[in-house]
Image (tube, grey):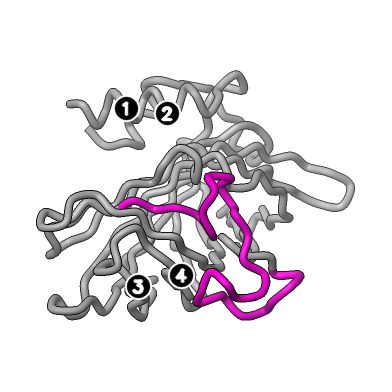
Amino acid sequence: MSQGLLWALAFQSPVDVQAGSTGTYVLELHVDTHAKLPFFGWTKSTTNSTVLAVIKNTEEGFIQRHTPCDVQVITRKVPAKTIIPKAMMDSLPIKTYGIEFYKNGKTWRYKADLGEDHIGYDPAITTTVPTQASDPGVIDGDKDGNPGVTVEIDVMMFGTSELYVAQRGHLWLEGVLEEDGTVRGKVNMAPVVQHTMDASNRFMMASPPIRPDPENSWFELRPVTPQTTCKDIQLLIQRRTKR
């Protein structure tokens, strides 16, 4: 069963397609990238992010409130598992940005610029993504006592290691509103810059180049009941992953 169908079954909500856009949604982002890893070469990773989105129509236009609920990373070809700790998940900011929701002929179109994300450093201090923990602008983004934000990686030969990273990324979305009230479309990406500033295991100290794969990246913005919370979404994802 697809995750989109699970949302539909769990959080069914009638949608006024003509009014179109205001309301509560689950935003699923499926973002593919390729990283050049030692020994493995260019390796594909998929980041699946689930967001609770609330869209409102204001005098200035449509706005979208964006609350991150879950992030999961899947890496192919490599005997390793990436784990996003709860502290990092909780550190991701809730943000609000303007969106375009307009009718083009008979088709409702949607555009959203999610803005530039700065993880593990303060862009007011430096415009360059830090490469070392001692670089200017490094912050303890997830408040765990380590520089940047902590990502765990479980590699068969080394066990679980902590990576302390800083990252800059920028996504923007373009999609079409379909008859069931779901917006589907593509994820566009600026180049991703990510540096491992330190690690609990020195063998894990690497900052491979990352290449976006917008051709295989997509999103769904699916209407749900106004009472839906991130906790509801997280519980549903946990049930799905245990199947």
For residue 39, side relative to residue 239 (left or right): left
Residues packed near mark 2 inside 10 Å, few (<14), some (14 to 19) or many (20 plus): some
For residue 193, side relative to residue 119 (left or right): left
Q: Distance between the residues labelled 3 and 1?
A: 27 Å
Q: Earlier in the sequence, mark 4 or mark 1?
A: 4
Q: Distance between the residues labelled 4 and 2?
A: 30 Å
Asked if marks 3 and 1 touch (Cβ < 8 Å), the reply is no
**Residue bearing mark 1:** 238
State the residue in front, 134 or 17: 134
Q: Which amino acid does label 4 sit on?
A: Met
**Residue bearing mark 4:** 197
Residue shown at the point (51%, 54%) measured from the top left: 146
First to last magenta residue range: 123-152
Asked if marks 2 and 1 touch (Cβ < 8 Å), the reply is yes
State the residue in front, 237 or 210: 210
Residues packed near mark 4 inside 10 Å, few (<14), some (14 to 19) or many (20 plus): many
**Residue bearing mark 2:** 234
**Residue bearing mark 3:** 213
Q: What residue type is labelled 2?
A: Gln
Residues packed near mark 3 inside 10 Å, few (<14), some (14 to 19) or many (20 plus): some
